[in-house]
Image (cartoon, rainbow, N blue to C red):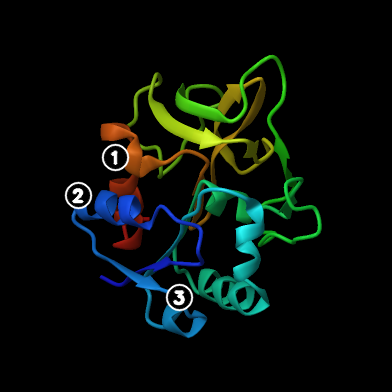
């Protein structure tokens, strides 16, 4: 199975590869947009500043959009989820992929930022192929200062000072603000669920 892991310089590749390997999937790391050809799924990882997504320029936008349009599943992790939105306050002049409406914002309130550690996915949970089989009190591991807004595509809401989109899902496009590869059995179940979608259990 050809799952393309996009290396655009935003890190956490090793842990993502290890997580997918644990659930029986092999990832092919790519750095050139032309290497997307033949991929059965795309994974956009990322940690750090939204500006790193500048490497995913118009050619990437066009290629990924075309593949999604042809039914290729896409998973964004952490900054990869933020990239799915129209943009972010963290890099105001840089456009996101724009598939999800709204802009990512800095977490606020009487809380420590960045938000680092375990938090629940229980609030606002909706029926989701990505979250299938997870208990209501499921928790995941977060590390971020910015987050996507809650909207029609949000399937899980987490609160840290303010509510934000912990997971989004639209057709075959999925995104998680947390790190499933570092979230123990909960995260591995999500990777298994994504793999099931890739294999045709849609």
Query: How many numbered badges does the structure rendering display?
Result: 3
Q: Quadrant of residue 5?
A: bottom left
Label annotation for residue 22: 2
Mark 2 neighbour class, 10 Å CA radius: few under 14, some 14 to 19, many 20 or more: some
Ranked by sequence position, the earlier of labels 3 and 1 is: 3
The residue sitting at the top extreme is 110
What's the CA distance linking mark 3 and mark 1? 27 Å
Residue ID at (72%, 47%): 90
Ranked by sequence position, the earlier of labels 2 and 3 is: 2
Label annotation for residue 189: 1
What's the CA distance linking mark 2 and mark 3? 23 Å
Q: Secondary structure at mark 1?
A: helix
Mark 3 or 1, closer to the camera: 3
**Would you say the residues marked 2 and 1 are in contact, meaning their CB atoms lie under 8 Å apart?**
no
Q: Secondary structure at mark 2?
A: helix
How far across and how far down the image is residue 51, in percent? 66, 57
Mark 2 or 1, closer to the camera: 2
The residue that label 3 is drawn on is 31
How far across and how far down the image is residue 52, in percent? 61, 60
Residue ID at (51%, 49%): 47
């Amino acid at each position: 199975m050809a799952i393309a892991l996009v290396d655009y310089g935003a890190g956490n590749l090793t842990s993502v590869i290890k997580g997918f390997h644990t659930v029986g999937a092999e990832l092919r790391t790519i750095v050139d947009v032309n290497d997307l050809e033949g991929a059965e799924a795309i994974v956009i990882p990322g940690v750090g500043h939204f500006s790193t997504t500048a490497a995913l320029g118009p050619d990437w936008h066009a290629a990924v959009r075309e593949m999604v349009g042809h039914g290729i599943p896409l998973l964004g992790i952490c900054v990869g989820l933020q990239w799915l939105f129209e943009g972010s306050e963290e890099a105001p002049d840089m456009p996101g992929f724009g598939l999800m409406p709204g802009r990512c914002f800095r977490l606020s309130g009487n809380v420590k930022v960045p938000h680092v550690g375990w938090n629940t996915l229980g609030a606002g949970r909706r029926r989701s192929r990505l979250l299938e089989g997870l208990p209501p009190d499921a928790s995941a591991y977060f590390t971020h200062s910015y987050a996507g807004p809650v909207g029609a595509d949000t399937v899980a809401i987490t609160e840290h000072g303010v509510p934000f989109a912990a997971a989004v899902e639209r057709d075959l496009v999925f995104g998680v603000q947390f790190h499933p590869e570092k979230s123990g059995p909960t995260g591995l179940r999500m990777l298994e669920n994504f793999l099931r979608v890739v294999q045709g259990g849609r």
